[in-house]
Amino acid sequence: MKIESIDFFYLSMPEVLDIGDGSQDAALVRVRAGGLEGWGECEAAPLPTIAAYVCPMSHSACKPVKASVEGMELNTPGDILKISKKVHENSFDLLQADHTLSGIDIALWDLLGKRLNEPVYKLLGYKKAHSKVPYASQLFGDTAEETYQKAVQARNAGYKAVKFGWGPIGRSTAAVDEAHFRAAREGLGKEHYLMIDIGTCWGEDVTAATARLQALKEINAYWLEEPFANMALDAYSQLAGSKPQVPLAAGEGCNNFVQAAAMIHHAGLRFVQIDTGRIGGITAAKRVAELAVNRGITYVNHTFTSHLALSASLQPYAGLENDIICEYPFEPKQLALDITANQLSINEHGTVHVPDQPGLGLTVDPERIRKYLVNTEIKVNGKILYQTPNLL
Amino acid sequence: MKIESIDFFYLSMPEVLDIGDGSQDAALVRVRAGGLEGWGECEAAPLPTIAAYVCPMSHSACKPVKASVEGMELNTPGDILKISKKVHENSFDLLQADHTLSGIDIALWDLLGKRLNEPVYKLLGYKKAHSKVPYASQLFGDTAEETYQKAVQARNAGYKAVKFGWGPIGRSTAAVDEAHFRAAREGLGKEHYLMIDIGTCWGEDVTAATARLQALKEINAYWLEEPFANMALDAYSQLAGSKPQVPLAAGEGCNNFVQAAAMIHHAGLRFVQIDTGRIGGITAAKRVAELAVNRGITYVNHTFTSHLALSASLQPYAGLENDIICEYPFEPKQLALDITANQLSINEHGTVHVPDQPGLGLTVDPERIRKYLVNTEIKVNGKILYQTPNLL
């Protein structure tokens, strides 16, 4: 079948707060072909992401993403790979292109799964999907006391693993950070997995990181996530070689396979975290999962938004039995919950099952998201290049 | 002084062709403060670049670039560093942000130089600017015969060094590529430097590259540029270790310092090529130049557009006496030439002198560029976030 339409929808909460919560807006993509619909989400700033889809060509390697997608054939997984490759060839000088491609690629897999009546993970070559142990992903409290309360709350909600990140961490003294680390462990109890996410606050500052290693060791941090900027290989590998050793996790900022490969090869990571909504979609993420297996590194999804994004992020490593941990949005905004009519709930064993329904196994209900629509129009030389499409 | 305004202008040739010529459009930036103007150019797709400046905030690390620039103080080089750091902290999840920052950073240096009555290279800490030997940067011909003619023409124009790139190379057989390589050398003569630019055509395909090494050696290629995708460290380092050895050059695709550092440390390069219009401006480029010196790698600018971009690209390594080669736009479109009223011409010694006038030493004349203006408007929820500003 031929791709008939690709539509971008910019959704937003009425108010977007200056906090590390990526679920406050969304760039949703709908692809139509053969009487079917596929949906995907870019984990990206909606306006530049849409602009990268529709912008006029600058030169042969700086074309709009649409030049490589519109009217293309979609019958096999190979067709999606072809589109992904074409976008990279035609748009490698358009920086935002990978974020734009991400939602399209996800929607294409969703659509193809529906067409072939298979869940995406089967199209990726996995025979079986292994359930994942979700960790609650949440922000540090403003105070250590608040962090403690949030940890208690997550434990009471039945989570076996909890990650705290962002908020005040890395913005003040080591003592303040350590108080938060200890409060999190205290609230959670000794038995639970506790991960700490720095949100790249330390930039390339290895000294700031090593000053906190002892405390991180003492609270038995399962991993230390994104202490540094994405691709700061030098800082990462220095920290990986420092004592006491705390396992490092990173990769969510990678916007293509070769960046993730660079992190896997040169950053000393124990965990590679991939957001399918940023890395170019499920296609690129699956390649990273294969490389991670080869290098003995654990693959983990990065997901902080909708269950559509969650399902997309689980598919690339659904069949990896040993990579059992998954990030699970613990306190997403209502917008993120409303994107899908159904959710990937946590079952009685405390795990998340990757859907066995065709495609991503989730239903996007236009009526639920209508109220979040941000009406957008881009006009160039009098010609409307983009305006918010009809949801129906 | 306080930054009073930042304005983006989208310029374009009437027709943009599907060729590897980045001079067909431009994203120009004008910064005003203290009664002065500074100008910069983003080497980037204009529309997404502008969108990244004005888009609504998505979350704390995905803010529009303007959030970190508007109203900031500009009195010392340290103030520009502060702005650059702030953009990275506030917008690291906005992929396009580095391209947007690039033109702003360049304009800030230009403005500060005018304010302090110093050329930018002096503000960067260099006592003296060393003239550079320009190489003519041009596209391969459609046929080997055409490539030969272009090489003859460049030699006759007095260039001591010529680079051929893009066009048909890497899109057909090794034999076709080799015919172009040999035609270039034949037309140029034995004494001249000849560089070959693959424009990332081989992706991550080391085999395709090694198949051409013998021919590249035989034509005595001074360097082999961008055989692979930016950041494909594995492919680069494999090729660097292959025989016969041909020096590798790359880096133009890097959009921040840490990526360039990764290429310097792990790609086996002999030359690192930085486009100040992409890497985040002069600030980031200067850091790369310092690292290159430390690692014994030659720094070269990447410039394919205007002389404003050329001056900006020369400043970061103006004071490096041993790094004498510079890319010089050989056949830019008229738009690129019209951006500045004056040009960095090649002197009687066949070299280019970095301007000693304040700032970047070039004058942008609004009247010359008016005809290239692309009227653009971005509207979100009824509010105009961007429209083409007045040129005067």
Image (cartoon, coloured by chain):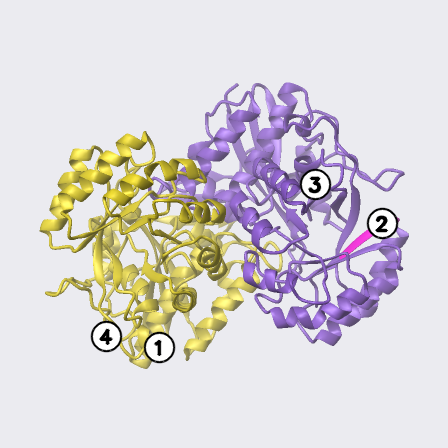
Chain colours: A purple, B yellow
Find the distance from the CA under tag 4 to the CA under tag 1. 12 Å
Whether residues under marks 4 and 3 lie with C-beta atoms below 8 angstroms apart, the answer is no
Q: Picture quarter containing residue A103? A: top right
Left or right of residue B175, residue B68 in this image: right
**Nearer the observer, A122 or A32:** A122
Q: Residue at x 53, y 34 (%)?
A: A7
Q: Secondary structure at mark 3?
A: helix
Callout 2: SS: loop
Q: Which residues are magenta?
A: A158-163
Amino acid, disc 3: Leu
Percent x, y of residue A329: 74, 48
Q: Is residue B323 above or below residue B223?
A: below
Q: Chain of mark 3?
A: A
Q: Earlier in the sequence, mark 3 or mark 2?
A: 2
Chain letter of the residue beneath label 2 in the structure image? A
Which amino acid type corresponds to the residue marked 2 in the rendered image?
Tyr
> Are tags 3 and 1 found on a single chain?
no
- State the mark number for residue A247: none
Residue B108, quarter of the rendered image: bottom left
Specify few, some or many for label 3: CA neighbours under 10 Å numbering under 14, 14-19, or 20 or more: many
Q: Position of residue B207 (x, y in %)?
A: 42, 36
Magenta-span inclusion, residue B161: no
Dot 3 corresponds to which residue? Answer: A310
Furthest residue toward front? B243
Residue under pointer 1? B123
Position of the N terminus of chain B, as image quadrant, is: bottom left
